[in-house]
Image (cartoon, grey):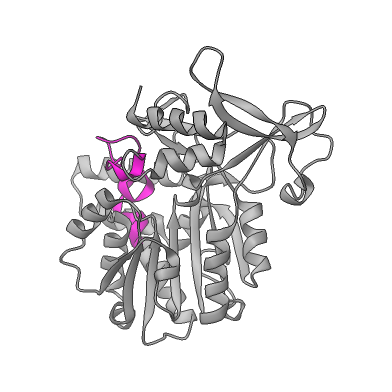
Amino acid sequence: MTPLEAELRRVIAADGPMSVASYMSICLGHPVHGYYMTRDPFGRGGDFITAPEVSQMFGELIGLWAAAVWQTMGSPAQVALVELGPGRGTLMADALRAARVVPAFAAAIHVHLVETSPVLERRQQELLARVDVPIAWHRDFAAVPSGPVIVIANEFFDALPVHQAVKTTSGWHERMVGIGPDGKLAFALHPDPIPGFATIAQGLPANAPPGAVFEWRPGDTAADVARRLVEQGGAAIVIDYGHVENALGETLQAVGRHGFTDPLAKPGDVDLTAHVDFAALARTATKAGTRVHGPISQGDFLRRLGIEARAEALRAKATAAQAADIEAALARLTGGGRESMGALFKAMAFADPKLGALPGFDS
């Protein structure tokens, strides 16, 4: 039993079963035993690899995308370059290096990293220590100072807590986490149907069969970002894995040591994520007044930004072994196979509607 499981059992014994969202929130963010509070999970020695860890090309192109957006914004004298959930800081380091090709943009940047993990914040500070750009860390996006912003959210929304509902003959009931007859953590259903479920599940087919699962997230973070863009100017890029339209199905998954495992088996010791509902994200952003661009596949987005030309430039200066690694990284970032990210991952932007077209989204 993990230390966090013992804590979860005490909470369930006192308060009864908790929602999947509450379980996920505690597993990832518990101040002492939470998954992200206690480790650096990235890279081959960790539990999973994200796109910035696959290749420098990813972060470089995001940096150039941000520079182009800044120009579309009218090149303000100062702009906050914000990253939500910046991991080790790899994406930001590569983005800032690429941004130097637009000196005026590099001079305008103030970097703000929104990070809740003290372990990862230390890694980011180490990696970015020599960067000649002002950098500040925050626990919440609301703490970012006022002014125009460009927001980067790569594999951020998939880690936000997700609620689950299960269809029964009496309606949709929220899935909970409690203690099963065998004494282990187990899924159960709340005894009462979810009130106002039709409002939550906009666009969901009315004839869903019994046993169907629907997942949703509160849109607080997306709404906060979108309102900021409308009120003070800017754009946000979201890159994550998920589905373009509302869909039935369970996507909650646990990952440890680059493999899948039971989400209830080792709370606090494995990562928990769920697919991003881009349709719901778009509705939230639109409701706040932003213009939504996409979603499109990550592969298409990176190709439109010029990843193939960047790969060719890197290969021209590489050894044979390095060239093979560059080709493998390009395939993983843009390919459509099961082991690749190009099709499963989507890119979507939302922005101040005055900005018009954004790079990567205008074919």
| Residue at figure coordinates x 72%, y 26% from the top left | 211
Q: Is residue 320 left or right of residue 60?
A: left
- Foreground residue, 151 or 145? 145
Report x, y in % for residue 277. Answer: 61, 48
| Residue at figure coordinates x 45%, y 58% from the top left | 153
- Foreground residue, 20 or 342? 20
Whether residue 257 is visible to the viewer of this picture, yes or no, is no
Question: Can you say whether 288 is above or below 340 in the image?
Answer: below
Report x, y in % for residue 314. Answer: 26, 55
Segment tinted magenta in the rendering: 34-60
Question: Can you say whether 87 is above or below 271 in the image?
Answer: below
Is residue 145 rendered magenta in the image? no
| Residue at figure coordinates x 21%, y 54% from the top left | 122
Q: Quadrant of the N terminus?
A: top left
- Foreground residue, 214 or 62? 214
Is residue 48 rendered magenta in the image? yes
